[in-house]
Amino acid sequence: MEHLKIFKQEIISCSSQEVECMQCNTEVYPIKMELSQNVREPEIFKEEFASFPSQDIDFTEVKVEEHSVVGKLSEHFRNPVILKYEIGSLPLQCNQCAKTFTEKLNLMKHQTMCSGEIQVQCNQGAKSFNQKADTVRHKRTHTGDKPFPCRQCDKSFTLKSDHVRHQRTHTTMKPFKCSQCDKCFTLNSQLVIHHRKHTGEKPLQCRQCDKSFKRNSKLLIHQRTHTGEKPFQCSQCGNTFTEKGSLVKHQMTHTGEKPFQYRQCDKSFIRNSQLLIHQRTHTRERPFQCSQCDKSFTRNNNCLRHQMTHTGEKPFQCRQCDKSFIRNSQLLIHQRTHTGERPFQCSQCGKSFTLKSDLVRHKRKHIREKPFQCSQCDKSFILKSDLVRHHRTHTGEKPFQCSQCNKSFIRNYQLVIHQRTHTGEKPLQCRQCDKSFTRNYQLVRHQRAHTGEKPFQCCQCDKSFIQKSDLVRHHITHTGEKPFQCSKCDKSFIQNSQLVIHQRTHTGEKPCQYSQCDNRFI
């Protein structure tokens, strides 16, 4: 009865039009169709079309030459474009949004969705549907019913369309060919989507924002960013995801499965994209080049972030202090300076850290592991980044340059702190008073004045100190060491400040003047 479904749509949409077969170009049927005795139960049309108004369709029994056998008729109209119309009237138009349709059935389906009318609701969940057929298909997700089995293998399918698509994997038939690049496809819908790569068309638009998409599946995934829906849940940890592919990749973190292996170094990866990026470390390929300078990158997102250094764009802004950042991760780390959050805690001593890298570095202090060794000297380091920075002490490289005074620095954070000397910026503020500071260690040291904390204790007596430098100076009082020696008279001092004052006896310098007279003092 497949051809009945085909003709059902044609009858509705062609009330006064001619229908012509595209294969034989000979038979032209008037809309008052006459069915052969071999086509059983013409009453089906009456029942199924009774709900559609303003269509006078008569059903009588007569012979249809050549197409009188059901099998032949079905076979005859199997190809991609089944019928063509000689349209003599205006297209059918939706009275709510002005969309036009060639078939009345499609118009009526659209109007139901356009009006927001809900006809059928799932009795197992809160979802509602405009079409009864959609509800039936949805219910199969609850029951697990797969009524369409493949006769050539053991697979079964929830939807008939999936079944048809699967059967073509057995026949390798790809009847739909692209006219621009000769690619062939199993389904016409695949060809339509493929054409959009050539045209750049993105017909599927999100109603809540201006984003458009080539595929309906991509639109559905995007809409979940607005609704917050995450329908795919991990059975082992409860994490939820917006798309099934993300869930599958996540589950590999539990199983330890890494299906994508590189043959040259035996490294394996969860994702194919990770494997491709890793291969570039061997080939040294950097396919993403900056359009404004000669720098190239292995990843596209790294290239995009780099280009922001040219444009000055910083799309991620802090709501509490108006600072902006190139990366979202930088913003998240910055926000911890406001909240005081330290989410990374050491399991051995309880210390907490703002950054994960700081925790990793700290943990190695417990085990004294320093896996990264300098090739030019005997120094070893806990982190690779520390080794990279150390190498610059051998090469003299200072890649971070100030744009205002041309000073260069080994580390980026040194440049950031230096730039505050130009701007006068003191971003680190004490919560208990109004004092602000340029560097984090200055803020930490100041806060101890409020808390009374003195973490640096002398091992030879009970004295404690706010700063480590104070403890070092105090230790000298026990050892009798005087490391600061005068170059003119061989006198030595415990503190550098004492040496500076002493040297003024040699130079005659008296920088301290009394405000009420002209007397000056060392």
Image (cartoon, helix red, strand yellow):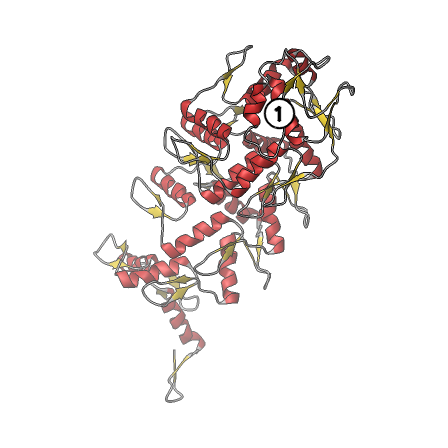
Left or right: where does residue 112 sit relative to residue 438? right
- Please tell me which residue lies in front, 154 or 463: 154
Residue 11 to residue 431: above or below: above
Which residue is rendered at x = 68% and y = 47% of the image? 291
Label 1 sits on residue: 8
176 shown above or below 479: above
Residue 344: x and y in percent read: 36, 44
User: How far across and how far down the image is residue 195, in percent?
Assistant: 69, 33
Q: In which quarter of the image is the C terminus?
A: bottom left
Query: Looking at the image, which residue is at 68% across and 24% down?
Result: 32
Question: In the image as oriented, which residue stretches furthest toward the bottom?
Answer: 517
Q: For numbered disc 1, what is the local secondary structure?
A: helix
Dot 1: within a 10 Å radius of its alpha carbon, few (fewer than 14), some, or many (20 or more) residues?
some
Q: Residue furthest right?
A: 26
Residue at the image position 62 percent from the left and 32 percent from the top: 55
User: What percent of the width, then of the height, locates residue 290?
Assistant: 66, 46
If the image is split into quadrants, where does the N terminus sit?
Answer: top right
Instruction: Give the amino acid at mark 1.
Output: Lys
Number of marks: 1
As drawn, is 294 to the left or to the right of 335?
A: right
Answer whether residue 368 is visible to the viewer in this image. yes
> Is 343 placed above or below 405 here?
above
The answer to whether residue 262 shows anywhere in this view is no
Viewer-closest of 273 and 475: 273
Please identify the residue farthest to the left as the structure is shown. Answer: 462
Residue 501 screen position, x and y as percent: 38, 72
Q: In this view, does 452 lie to the left or right of 100?
A: left
Q: Decide which of 115, 321 is in the foreground and name it.
A: 115
Picture quadrant of residue 47: top right
Task: Using the image as rendered, state which of residue 337 and residue 444 is in the foreground.
Answer: 337
